């Protein structure tokens, strides 16, 4: 693959490009209020926490529609806290205070998501963001399950995410230092047991099995788009080798894709995981709302410099993966060679 005409080649040109883009984005950030930088996303997370009691109370009703409403409220709130909240907290995008960033990471990642915060930060921030689409490092290979066929993977496997997540957490914590392991186990257990206890004592479930079944349903409500989004935005795009990876701006513009805005996913997952994923990979410490605000600046800049700005629809990616599942999810992806950029 050769760079587009007009795109500066070599590390010096790439660093200059990234520096110019960073300057433009910083101008937007400096001109933004606290509400724009952090407040909007904090308000969404606060509303999700405040909506939880209504969801549990709706499950008390014998009316089917009210019961389904309760399941929906709890499911959407769960994904807002575990995906959007954990993602922003892991990147330190909820607050400028390091201490509060640490507290929010423990709450959203360990209590709400049932996963160790340290491993989430290492796997996502250090590996995935630091080595985006580099084979063996940040190539999203953890999402590949080659022993599953396309229909099982795309339609059934997402339902197992609520079960697999705490099991993986226990496996990771078994290798951690004693203090970290005990803290993580305590916080993960607190989150899971609180959900279970509230279903029994507030929602009025009469048996442990029915409460556990309700936990599984609410925690898998948006599991399908969660799994799909994680593979759609990187797999199938250019992959790079460890020793010949391009400079950061080329890596992110080539190896990341934006989906269009989808209201329910924008709310529950956040703009940085849906319509502003390119912006998020370039500026990972920006909040969801700020990624949305700088999106026109980033897209205009990349187009001006003749750099890729990948966009596609959810359905288009879905049918692409379903038709080329073997190529994308089973076989080892080919390495992209960028002439003059590596």
Image (cartoon, rainbow, N blue to C red):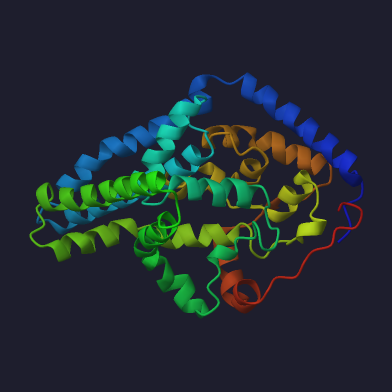
Q: Where residue 38 sits in the image (x, y, percent)?
A: 49, 27
The one of 175 and 330 positioned closer to us in this rendering:
175
Q: Is 207 on the left or on the right of 1, as rendered? A: left
Q: Is 21 on the left or on the right of 108, as rendered? A: right
In the rendered view, tell whether residue 210 sits above or below residue 179.
below
Q: Where residue 175 sits in the image (x, y, percent)?
A: 45, 56
Residue at 46 percent across and 57 percent down: it is 226
Q: How many marks?
A: 0
Q: Quadrant of residue 142?
A: bottom right
Q: Quadrant of residue 152?
A: bottom left
Residue at 48 percent across and 78 percent down: it is 151
**Quadrant, the N terminus:** bottom right
**Any part of residue 266 in sight:** no
Residue at 39 percent across and 48 percent down: it is 178
Q: Is 116 on the left or on the right of 7, as rendered? A: left
The one of 265 and 326 positioned closer to us in this rendering:
326
Q: Where residue 35 sits in the image (x, y, percent)?
A: 48, 23
In the rendered view, tell whether residue 228 sits above or below residue 270.
below
In the rendered view, tell whether residue 337 sits above or below residue 105.
below
- Which residue in the rendered view is the most extreme toward the front? 178
In the rendered view, tell whether residue 114 sits above or below residue 210.
above
Residue at 82 percent across and 40 percent down: it is 304
**Any part of residue 180 in sight:** yes
The one of 51 and 284 positioned closer to us in this rendering:
284
Q: Where residue 36 sits in the image (x, y, percent)?
A: 52, 25
Q: Is 99 on the left or on the right of 53, as rendered? A: right
């Amino acid at each position: 693959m050769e760079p587009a005409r007009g795109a500066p080649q070599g590390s010096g040109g790439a660093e200059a490009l990234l520096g110019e883009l960073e300057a433009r984005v910083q101008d937007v950030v400096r001109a933004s209020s606290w509400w724009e930088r952090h407040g909007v996303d904090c308000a969404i997370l606060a509303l999700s926490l405040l909506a939880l009691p209504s969801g549990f109370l709706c499950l008390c009703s014998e009316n089917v529609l009210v019961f389904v409403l309760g399941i929906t409220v709890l499911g959407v709130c769960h994904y807002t806290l575990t995906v959007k909240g954990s993602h922003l907290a892991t990147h330190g995008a909820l607050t400028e205070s390091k201490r509060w960033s640490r507290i929010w990471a423990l709450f959203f990642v360990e209590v709400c998501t049932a996963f160790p915060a340290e491993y989430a930060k290492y796997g996502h921030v250090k590996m995935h963001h630091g080595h985006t689409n580099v084979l063996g490092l940040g190539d999203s290979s953890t999402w590949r399950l080659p022993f599953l066929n396309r229909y099982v993977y795309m339609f059934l496997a997402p339902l197992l995410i609520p079960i697999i997540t705490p099991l993986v957490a226990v496996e990771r914590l078994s290798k951690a230092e004693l203090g970290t392991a005990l803290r993580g186990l305590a916080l993960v257990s607190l989150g899971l047991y609180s959900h279970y206890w509230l279903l029994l004592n507030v929602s009025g479930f009469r048996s442990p099995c029915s409460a556990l079944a309700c936990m599984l349903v609410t925690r898998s409500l948006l599991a399908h788009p969660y799994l799909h989004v994680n593979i759609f935005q990187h797999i199938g795009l250019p992959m790079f080798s460890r020793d010949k990876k391009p400079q950061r701006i080329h890596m992110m513009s080539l190896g990341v894709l934006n989906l269009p805005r989808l209201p329910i996913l924008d709310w529950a997952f956040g703009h940085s995981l849906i319509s502003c994923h390119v912006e998020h990979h370039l500026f990972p410490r920006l909040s969801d709302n700020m990624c949305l605000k700088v999106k026109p600046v980033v897209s205009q800049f990349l187009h001006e410099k003749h750099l890729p700005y990948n966009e596609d629809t959810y359905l288009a990616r879905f049918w692409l993966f379903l038709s080329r599942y073997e190529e994308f999810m089973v076989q080892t992806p080919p390495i992209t060679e960028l002439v003059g950029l590596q």
